[in-house]
Structure formats: C-alpha cells, structure tokens
Image: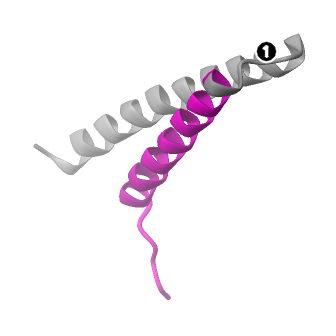
Amino acid sequence: MSDKQDLNEIDTRLESLRAAHRALDNRINQLLSEGYPDQVELQRLKKQKLALRDRIGVLENGRYPDIIA
C-alpha cells in the first residue's frame, strides 16, 4: 500500500470518528437541555466521547507527525 492510500484511509477514519464525536456531543447537549438527564447514560456518553477523542488524537498524530526543527 502506498503512503497516499494510507493517508486517505486515515483521513476517512478521522472524518468518521469526528462525525461520531459530534453526534455524541449533540446527544449529551440534548440530554442536558431536557432537564433531569439520566446520569448513568450521560456518564456513559461522556466516556464514549472521551474515548473517541483519544482515538482521533492518535490518528491525527500519525497523520501529522511532530517535526522538530
């Protein structure tokens, strides 16, 4: 597989993860705006959102490596 294909796969995965992260954020905000949210569900969604953020960070670091000048 070429580097370009690898980068395209990473970009596709990043977009998918970012969309899932936005969806979780929207759901969390919806629960909070409804008043008296289910705290267990809210905690579960927040943990999922953090896990997605971590996975996004790992992929971004692979996509855009740190370059020390």
From the viewer's perspective, is 53 left or right of 43? Answer: left
The image shows residue 50 at horizontal and vertical percentages of 56, 43
The image shows residue 25 at horizontal and vertical percentages of 69, 27
Colouring style: one colour
Q: Which residue is mark 1?
A: 30
Q: At x 78% / y 18%, what residue is drawn?
A: 37
Report if residue 40 lies within the magenta region: no
The image shows residue 10 at horizontal and vertical percentages of 34, 41
Q: At x 53% / y 24%, what residue is drawn?
A: 20
The secondary structure that most of the magenta stretch takes on is: helix
- Extreme residue toward the left, this view: 1
- Extreme residue toward the top, this view: 34
Q: Nearer the viewer, residue 28 or 12?
A: 28
Q: At x 49% / y 39%, what residue is drawn?
A: 52
From the viewer's perspective, is 36 left or right of 47? Answer: right
Q: Quadrant of residue 27?
A: top right
Image: magenta residue range = 41-69
Asked if 42 appears above or below 2 in the picture, the reply is above
Q: Secondary structure at mark 1?
A: helix
The image shows residue 40 at horizontal and vertical percentages of 63, 26
Q: Nearer the viewer, residue 2 or 36?
A: 36
- The image shows a total of numbered marks equal to 1
Which corner quadrant holds the N terminus? Answer: top left
Q: At x 85% / y 17%, what residue is drawn?
A: 36
Q: Quadrant of residue 11?
A: top left
> Local crowd at mark 1 within 10 Å, few (<14), some, or many (≥20)?
few
Q: Amino acid at mark 1?
A: Gln
